[in-house]
Image: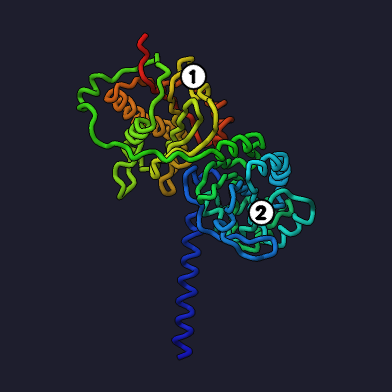
Amino acid sequence: MSVKRNVLVLLIAGVVAMGCHRVFASVPESADRVKPLSAGADIPDVSVMQADGSAVNLRDLLTQPTVLIFYRGGWCPFCNMHLGQLQEAHAELVKLGYQILAISPDLPAKLAESVEKGDLGYTLLSDSTMAAAQGFGIAFRVDDATLEKYKGYGIDLEAASGESHHLLPVPAVFIAGTDGTVKFAYANADYKVRLEPAALLAAAKGAAGETVKLPAPRQSGGIPLLDALKQRRSVRSFSEKPIEQQLLSDLLWAAFGVNRPESGMRTAPSSYNWQDVTLYVFTPEGVWTYEATGHRLLPVRQGDHRKLAGLQSYVWDAPLSFVYVSDFAKMQQGDESFSADYKLKIGGIDVGHISQNVYLFCASEGLGAVARASVDAKAFAEVFGLSPHQHVMFGQTIGWPSED
């Protein structure tokens, strides 16, 4: 009987070990290969530890809008500097109804040391197993050469985390809603580059807006395809007549919506099904991103920001503009790496498909549209907190053609 029990214990231990190996084996070998969660994604079902050593499910902490800050550890001077800078935004974030949770691989005992050093405006949490970092797609494996270099500086990652996984998170900031979804995401593989407090405040104000649940899109009707092709053209003069919500719903579905619910596939093809494109929607009332799976608009910024959608003056008055952003970090196929030029081509192809869908829908509905390269990509990235691997491809303006 004891032999059977021992065999059973060994089998269970082997399965557990294999399971752990599979989890860690899937972690990228470098920081520039991580795939952070995007806006609209569900907050992962993971546990973290509080400074007193007690475990808590991260979702259970989301009782109010939350800023989640992932940092490398108390040993990192850049992390400490960033956490100090974010104190500047703390009071304003609290006024907006937010709490701040800062998560690192440090053991709870290490967190307690940090708490004792000063009056922090945020809660420190331990992710020593790196389960949360993996769930958010920002964990990576530190190579042996870097581990040795750290040891030369007196930094022992195993002692800091109490684990031998040799994993670290890419520094990142996520804004989570009480509905358990990501409202904003920022990650940078360069640990020296962090999200500025002003950019975080702007993102928090935008995320505080309401999600727009679009009406069900109409998926039949319109004019024949050949007639739409015949009428397809670029229009650069628009009336101020608004686009009503049902028509916007139909347009977004036609552009990049889910047309095969059983698989989640879209109306526009995506290379390797990477789904690298984020569609920003600009109206006089605000800026949103389109989440196709829920067919809804996620708030980014309130107010009229149409000048960020393009440089031409007609963009600033048109009722609707799209800006297409491609996330090069999603362009990975196993261990295969792709050049920046190849990723640029892929991003251009994927966005081109969506843009043509927009053109054809507009031709069918009597709307005008024009695709434009003239977007100030640098200003756009700064205002909306794009990561270095997110690239503005181009914009597209839509509206009722002017009668002039």
Decide if residue 28 is in sight here.
Answer: no
Is 158 positioned to the left or the right of 351 in the image? right
Q: In which quarter of the image is the C terminus?
A: top left
Q: In the rendering, which numbered label is found on residue 316? A: 1
Q: Where is residue 287 in the image (x, y as percent from the top left)?
A: 50, 31
Asked if marks 1 and 2 touch (Cβ < 8 Å), the reply is no
Q: Position of residue 106 (x, y in %)?
A: 67, 57
Which of 372 and 18 lies nearest the eye of the viewer?
372
C-alpha gap between disc 1 and disc 2: 54 Å
The residue at the point 47 percent across, 18 percent down is 317
Q: Quadrant of the N terminus?
A: bottom left
Q: Where is residue 394 in the image (x, y as percent from the top left)?
A: 44, 25
Q: Is 387 situated above or below 235?
A: below
Q: Residues within 10 Å of mark 1 (few under 14, many from 20)?
A: many
Looking at marks 1 and 2 on the same chain, the residue that comes earlier in the sequence is marked by 2
Q: Which residue lies furthest to the right in this view?
A: 117
The amino acid sitting under disc 2 is Glu
Q: Is 52 situated above or below 200?
A: below
Is 337 positioned to the left or the right of 369 in the image? right
Q: Is 367 situated above or below 154?
A: above
Residue bearing mark 2: 148
Q: Residue furthest top?
A: 404
The residue at the point 32 percent across, 27 percent down is 356
What is the secondary structure assignment of the residue under circle 2?
helix
Decide if residue 254 is in sight here.
Answer: yes
The amino acid sitting under disc 1 is Trp
Q: Position of residue 232 (x, y in %)?
A: 28, 20
The residue at the point 37 percent across, 13 percent down is 402
The residue at the point 74 percent across, 59 percent down is 112
Quadrant position of residue 233? top left
Q: Is 55 situated above or below 310?
A: below
